Image (cartoon, helix red, strand yellow):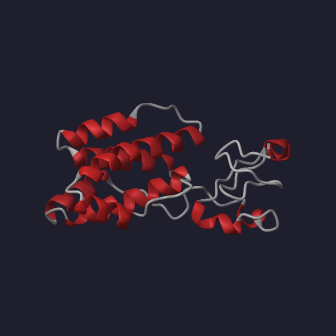
Amino acid sequence: MKCYMCGTEFSGKYCTNCGAIAKDEQSDYSNKPVVLISPFQKNRASSENYNNYSNVNSSSGIKKRSIAVCILLTVITCGIYGIYWFVKLNDEVNYLSSVQVPVSGGTALFLTIITCGIYGLFWMYNQGEKLETARMQRNMPAGNLAVLYLILAVLSFGIISYALMQYEINSMV
């Protein structure tokens, strides 16, 4: 059977890659929400122990952050908190969108530094794409976040993109 969420071939009730319930099995669970297992948890998403995680929210471990406090801390610390925020945004968006091969926050930061910010532009666009995927998985209305984040980054308003990303994350948690 082919997973309708990620396209991986699998057998059984649950996708071994993303944890989505098989289409044939969804009728048995129509009153339960579909729980997406992150790529970091895919080894635990076997049909034998899936029920242990059926009450886990897809956003577990992610806390809402105050956007104003994040911006203020970034300004007060001369951008040091902004680096931390960048890494956390990356990891949380990866988790929410159930990316198959995620780039860690540290790797994204390293690539942005060694490419003198060019990877950062790609990262902004890619974050928007991942957030759109996460919104569609939660049946939320989609927009065009990727282009908005890229335009803001090109115009040197990256912190506004961070704030908009945090707003999206807060709305999904």
- Measured from the top left, where is residue 13 in percent x and y? 82, 53
In the rendered structure, the answer to whether residue 170 lies left or right of residue 32 reads: left
Of residues 149 and 78, the one drawn nearer to the viewer in this rendering: 149
* Among the 4 quarters of the image, the one containing residue 146: top left
On screen, residue 106 versus residue 112, left or right, reads right
Residue appearing at x 33%, y 55% in the figure: 66
The x and y percentages for residue 43 are 68, 68
Count of number-bearing discs = 0
Which of the pair 173/20 is nearer the observer?
Answer: 20
Relative to 92, 33 lies left or right? right
Q: Residue at x 78, y 63 (%)?
A: 51
**Which residue occupies the extreme front position in the image?**
115
Viewed as shown, does residue 46 lie left or right of 87?
Answer: right
Residue in the image at 38% along x and 36% along y: 145
Residue 113 % position (x, y): 23, 62
Give the residue displayed 76% in from the left and 64% down from the top.
46
Residue 16 vs residue 162, the one in the foreground: 16
Residue 137 occupies which quadrant of the picture? top right
- Residue 73 drawn above or below residue 141: below
Picture quadrant of residue 106: bottom left
Q: Nearer the viewer, residue 11 or 153?
A: 11
